[in-house]
Amino acid sequence: MRAILINVSDGQKQILDNMMLVFCTAIRYSFKRLLEGVKIGDLEKDVANKYNLNIRQAKDAVENARQTIQSQKELVKMNYQNYGRKVKAIEKQLKSDKLSDKKRNALLSKLDKRKRKLHYWQYFIDAHTIPPVVFGTKQMFLRRCKGLITNQEWKDCRNNRIYSRGDKTKNGNPNLREVIKNNMTFLEISTLEKTETNRAIKIQVPIYLPQKFSKKTGKVNGIKYRELFLNH
């Protein structure tokens, strides 16, 4: 369910930007340590101490890194299978006696490229590793290399999210909670700022849930997310 934080004050924005910076840095650190073979349990404690996160935030950072690695492994398998099918398809075409020399040479050239790609992906499967990952997307990295975006814009791409899971034993998500006050919906966020008793300072930011009304009927098009949210 997509929502937008609205009426965010300058102070709240600064707190949120800092949270995203710390959290994304923790994800990248966890990503590298997992590739080095560090155990998840040990890594969670290390991340909590290193970045001053509570253990739940540290677990979420490590889990996000683990999911990135797992998705990359699945992507490697998918690409390997895809190029394997392409190689077989071209080899099947080459068995035909009706091909002209020009067509056969073109297919042989294409087959060579497909086999190189197949061997590229096979290497990662055999080595039990993944290709290099660019946090902030490869597209934006290339734009930064070409000077098309500023260094700050590139950093904003790399540090632009917070990942937090709910927990049945905590009646939801202890770090991100939805609250309703005076018929307005807010997202209550446990920040990295601490009180004198070392408890997390919470901020409440208004949420807007977009919905589109039909010009003909005046009713909401698609799922009524706002109604579902309020009922929940």
Image (spheres, rainbow, N blue to C red):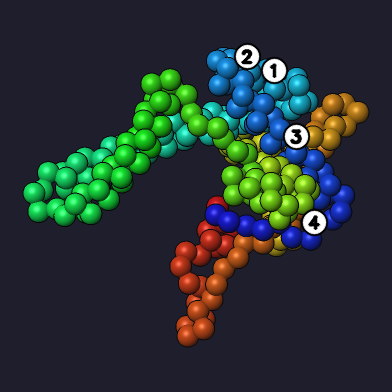
Question: x, y percentage for residue 113?
Answer: 35, 41
> How many residues crowd mark 3 within 10 Å: few (<14), some (14–19), many (20+)?
some
Q: Is residue 147 above or below residue 58?
A: below
Element assignment for label 2: helix
Please state which amino acid type lies under the numbered disc 2.
Asp
Query: Quarter of the image holding residue 9?
Result: bottom right
User: Dots 1 and 4: beta carbons under 8 Å?
Assistant: no
Residue 50 placement, left or right of 113? right
Q: CA distance from mark 3 to mark 4?
A: 20 Å
> Can the viewer see residue 21?
yes
Q: Which residue is mark 3?
A: 22
Please state which amino acid type lies under the numbered disc 4.
Val
Q: CA distance from mark 2 to mark 1?
A: 6 Å
Q: Which residue is mark 4?
A: 8
Element assignment for label 3: helix
Mark number displayed over residue 42 = 2
In the current view of this chain or complex, which residue is farthest to the bottom? 216
Question: x, y percentage for residue 31?
Answer: 60, 27
Q: Residue at position x 37%, y 35% from top? A: 116
User: Dots 3 and 2: beta carbons under 8 Å?
Assistant: no
Query: Quarter of the image holding residue 109?
Result: top left
In the current view of this chain or complex, which residue is farthest to the left? 97
Please state which amino acid type lies under the numbered disc 1.
Asp
Earlier residue among tags 3 and 4: 4
Q: Which residue is mark 1?
A: 46
Question: x, y percentage for residue 156?
Answer: 73, 47
Element assignment for label 1: helix
Question: x, y percentage for residue 12?
Answer: 83, 49
Query: Quarter of the image holding residue 82?
Result: top left
Element assignment for label 4: loop
Earlier residue among tags 1 and 4: 4
